[in-house]
Each structure stands twice: as structure tokens, then as C-alpha cells.
Image (cartoon, rainbow, N blue to C red):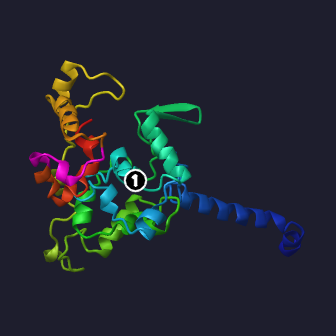
């Protein structure tokens, strides 16, 4: 008769390999469907630790759409230049930024990027079928770090959470918002419309505004200007000449016309004097 213990002692490496393969397969399966830890190399080594951590710059100074729209937004070049036209010019990464703004293009990995802006590599991306709004979460008091992790400690930004469906639902369960903020477990009568109600969610969705932009690097034709924004560019150039300004975005709040000052007073445009290109493409 074959002795199983004798076989196990002789061929011990076979079950060991099977156990190791099972553990490796389980670890792969757990981490195969999310991008937690993803940290792409950026064209400029921007440090959230320095800006949000050491300098304590509020997240919404750069990501100014987070409280008012679905997308937090990538800061336009004018936000960066609003500070770095005046500070940090001796630092190599800031010199790269200024060179991109001055030249209007740059090369990376054999590809030429035009437009005079930094083409940042996106870190966080949800599937196309997911509808997520920063506005509802920020206005609901959810901290940026809840989803993005301790960004004020990250020299290189990385994806902190899995951002999969289970992760989102677990957060909503902890906050009792899946069944409404007044839900009491085991008491169906306390259930109110929350994020679990698909019809309510669809009704609250907001479409992105439809805008028309002029192509970067193309001369502004009369027809193109009229289609994008009537006479805006002509008025903008006239205003720059009238005020004797060197160029955008080196405006002071006191230099803005009355129509712009009225908007500058609203918190959602708290740094509007550095965001001219947001409206005046």
C-alpha cells in the first residue's frame, strides 16, 4: 500500500507550489480590478506636499470647480502663473513651467504637446457608466482626503483608494445615506430617498454646459470669434492696451472692469484674476 505521509515527505514541494500559486492567485484577484497606488510620471514634478501641506494652499484654490460642478477640474495655466510669474523662478521645475508658457509647446517621449499648457497625466478615473459629482460631496462636508487620501503628504500624487463600487457603497453605508440620513437599521419606515434610488439620482444629474472654443494656435477669424464669444477677444485686447498691462494673467483685482469685479466678489471665483483663460479661450 502507498503511504500518503511517505509521498508527502518525498514530494513536499508539490503541495507547497500549489499553496503558493493559490495565494498568488488570490492576491492578484483582489488587486486586479482597481488602480490603487497608480502614480504616473508627470511632465512637471508638482508636489502636493509642498503646496497643500507646507504652504497650506486650499484645495479649491486650484480645483475651483469642486464645490460647484461635477468635476474638480485641472487648474488652467493661468492659476500656476498667477504665483510663479513672481515666485520660484530659480527652481528647475518652475523654469520648465515658464518655458512651456513662453514657447507655447514642449516635447515629452517623442511627442510634441502644443497649446502653451501642461498636459498632466490623469490619476483618478471612474468608468464611463459611473455618474459622480464633486459638488454634492464637497457641499455635503466630505473632505478631499476621504477619497484622495492624505494628498498634503504626497510628493508624487497617487491613487489612494480602490474607487470601486464596493468601496463607494461601504462609505455610504457608514454614513447611513444609502437609505437616507434618517435611516434606522431594521425599521423600513425610516427609509427615505437616498443614493440607492436610481430615479432620484437620474433626476439630480446635471448636464455639462455646451461651450465653443477657438482652436489653440489658430488665428482668430471674425466668424470664429462671433461663434465663441461676440467681440470678447477684441474687448480683451483693448482693455489690456488701455490699462497698460503687459499680458495676462498679471491683473490686480483693482484693474478689473466693473462687470468682472462683481463676479470676483463671489467665493466660487475667489482667484478669478488668475483665471482669465477659463472664460477667454
Instruction: Say if residue 258 shows up in the picture.
Output: yes
Give above or below for 113 relative to 197.
Answer: above
> 105 and 196: which one is in front?
105
| Mark 1, residue position | 86
| Residue 206 percent coordinates (x, y) | 18, 48
Work out whether residue 150 or residue 199 is closer to the camera in this orientation and state it.
Answer: 150
Q: In this orientation, which residue lies closer to the viewer: 128 or 118?
A: 118
**Which quadrant of the figure has residue 101?**
top left
Is the residue 219 above or below the residue 137 in the image?
above
Q: In this view, does 238 lie to the left or right of 74?
A: left
Left or right of 81, for residue 268: left
Q: Residue at point 32% right, 27% down?
A: 215
Could you say where residue 172 lies in the image, as x and y percent from the top left? 30, 69
Position of residue 107 relative to residue 35, above or below, is above
Q: In this view, does 51 lie to the left or right of 28?
A: left
Expressed as whole percent of the image width and height from the top left, the position of residue 98 reads 46, 44
Q: Examine the structure image and report whether residue 136 is included in the region drawn in magenta.
A: no
Which x, y percent locates residue 226?
16, 24
Observer able to see residue 126:
no
- Span of residues in magenta: 249-260
Tell me the quadrant of the picture where the N terminus can be found. Answer: bottom right
Residue displayed at 20% across by 41% down: 243
Amino acid at each position: 500500500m502507498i503511504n500518503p505521509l511517505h509521498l508527502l515527505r518525498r514530494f513536499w514541494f508539490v503541495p507547497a507550489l500549489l499553496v503558493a500559486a493559490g495565494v498568488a492567485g488570490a492576491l492578484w484577484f483582489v488587486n486586479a480590478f482597481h488602480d490603487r497606488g497608480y502614480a504616473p510620471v508627470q511632465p512637471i514634478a508638482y508636489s502636493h506636499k509642498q503646496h497643500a501641506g507646507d504652504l497650506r494652499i486650499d484645495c479649491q484654490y486650484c480645483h475651483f470647480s469642486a464645490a460647484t460642478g461635477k468635476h474638480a477640474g485641472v487648474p488652467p495655466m493661468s492659476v500656476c502663473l498667477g504665483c510663479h510669474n513672481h515666485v520660484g523662478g530659480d527652481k528647475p521645475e518652475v523654469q520648465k513651467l515658464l518655458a512651456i508658457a513662453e514657447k507655447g509647446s514642449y516635447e515629452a517621449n517623442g511627442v510634441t504637446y502644443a497649446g502653451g499648457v501642461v498636459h498632466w497625466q490623469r490619476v483618478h478615473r471612474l468608468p464611463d457608466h459611473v455618474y459622480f459629482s464633486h459638488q454634492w460631496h464637497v457641499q455635503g462636508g466630505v473632505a478631499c482626503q476621504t477619497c484622495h487620501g492624505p494628498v498634503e503628504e504626497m510628493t508624487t500624487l497617487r491613487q489612494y483608494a480602490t474607487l470601486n463600487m464596493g468601496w463607494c457603497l461601504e462609505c455610504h453605508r457608514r454614513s447611513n445615506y444609502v437609505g437616507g440620513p434618517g435611516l434606522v437599521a431594521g425599521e423600513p419606515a425610516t427609509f427615505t430617498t437616498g443614493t440607492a434610488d436610481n430615479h432620484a439620482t437620474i433626476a439630480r444629474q446635471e448636464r455639462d454646459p455646451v461651450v465653443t472654443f477657438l482652436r489653440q494656435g489658430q488665428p482668430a477669424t471674425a466668424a470664429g470669434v462671433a461663434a465663441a464669444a461676440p467681440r470678447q477677444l477684441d474687448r480683451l485686447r483693448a482693455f489690456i492696451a488701455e490699462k497698460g498691462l503687459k499680458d495676462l494673467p498679471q491683473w490686480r483685482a483693482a484693474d478689473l472692469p466693473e462687470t468682472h469685479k462683481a463676479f470676483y466678489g463671489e467665493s466660487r471665483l475667489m482667484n478669478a484674476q488668475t483665471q482669465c483663460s477659463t472664460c477667454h479661450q
